[in-house]
Amino acid sequence: MSHSDTAPNPLRSRAFVPKSAGIVGLGSIGGSLALRLGSTVVKAVFDTDAGTATLARAKGFATTGSVKELASMVDLVVVATPMSFVRDVFSELSQVRRTKPLLVTDVSSVRVPVNEAAAGAGLLEPPISFVGGHPMAGSEHAGFRSASAGMLEGCAWVLAIDDRTDLDSWLAVAAFLSRSIGARVVPVAPSEHDQVMAWVSHLPHVLAAALAGGLTGSPSPGMLTSFAVPGAPGLPASLAAGSFRDVTRVAGSPPDRSSEMARWNAGFLSAAVHLLERELDAVRAYLASPEDLELVSFFEQGRKGRDQLTRPRAALERVSIPITSSQETLCRLLDLGRAGGWVTQVVLGGRPARIEGSRPRDRREQR
């Protein structure tokens, strides 16, 4: 049970939505968020790279000399560093002394270990309150120079919910994201997030690296053997066209970022690799068979899955969730996320206070 059930929280009682933000780490995501929000909302940024800090100042952002200094200036801190640095940043934030509430969120692509790190640093105790996040946006490029004000506009933005989540803090961050950048806020349990991300993001990075690495002629131990044809070493790269380029796009991501992502989600990613191995073993058996039926069925299933991503979004229905007890409201939010839905608006000052959202209409109801 979160402490919102046992004591009044100043966030809800004042219909609190953060008015100012500070961003720690100005890579592609942190930089894009800063550019989208602008310097009127982003009161301070911090990055350990001097060149990045200089670029930020040139864009009109105030830079600080430390995370603690930044946290003293804002309502919301967004930690947008690589995951290998989040523990250090959380440790600095835990040393901040203030009487006003301080909200902290992040953009990490793996939730369970980062949420645990926040709890271990004491970021779940008032006046500091951590709400883990992950924007479903970005590119294979890195750094502030790759940032874009439009990158995060209207994106799906995960906000994690577990049994330690403070509802009022979650609502405050959700309200900020939905109002400031039009984010579709998706409530997700951390372990469910990491299991899904292993399939839809982390495994594709592994496959892209394996396939693209075969072009080099000298793959790493354990990777695919070289695609090079004896006597024709340049032929594979010259014939690799659209399908190969599409499936290997994310192999262009910084190797340290991809490795970090895979390592932090090693358990679920290993399970996904194992299941894919079984699928490929089945394909090998299909190829050995003179019958085409199973092979056609395999590709047909893939086409159906791809259609789900590319066809127009299914008819939506509006959802309104009254903000009642923390446990009931958080459970209903998780149900919304599990149904493929998201939060579009948080009405904290309304009577009653409520959460507005959308979800795909059940196809059985459309018949």
Image: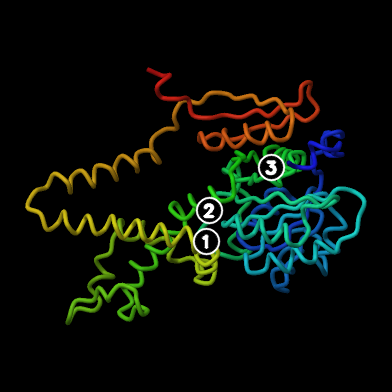
Locate residue 203, reporting x and y percent: 42, 59
CA–CA distance in space, label 1 to label 2: 7 Å
Q: Earlier in the sequence, mark 3 or mark 2?
A: 3
Upstream in sequence: badge 1 or badge 2: 2
Q: Tell me whether circle 1 and circle 2 mark residues in contact (CB < 8 Å).
A: yes
Residue at the image position 68 percent from the left and 31 percent from the top: 328
Q: Would you name the residue on which mark 3 appears?
A: 177
Image quadrant where residue 318 sits = top right
Q: Residue furthest left?
A: 290
Q: Is residue 9 left or right of residue 254?
A: right
Q: Nearer the viewer, residue 31 or 281?
A: 281
Three-letter amino acid code of the residue under disc 3:
Leu
What amino acid does circle 2 point to? Asp
Give the alpha-carbon distance from disc 3 to disc 2, as whole Å.
21 Å
Q: Secondary structure at mark 1?
A: loop
Q: Quadrant of the C terminus?
A: top left
Along the polypeptide, which appears first: circle 1 or circle 3? 3
Query: Mark 2 = which residue?
Result: 194
Side (left or right) of 171 relative to 138 = right
The residue type indicated by label 1 comes to Asn
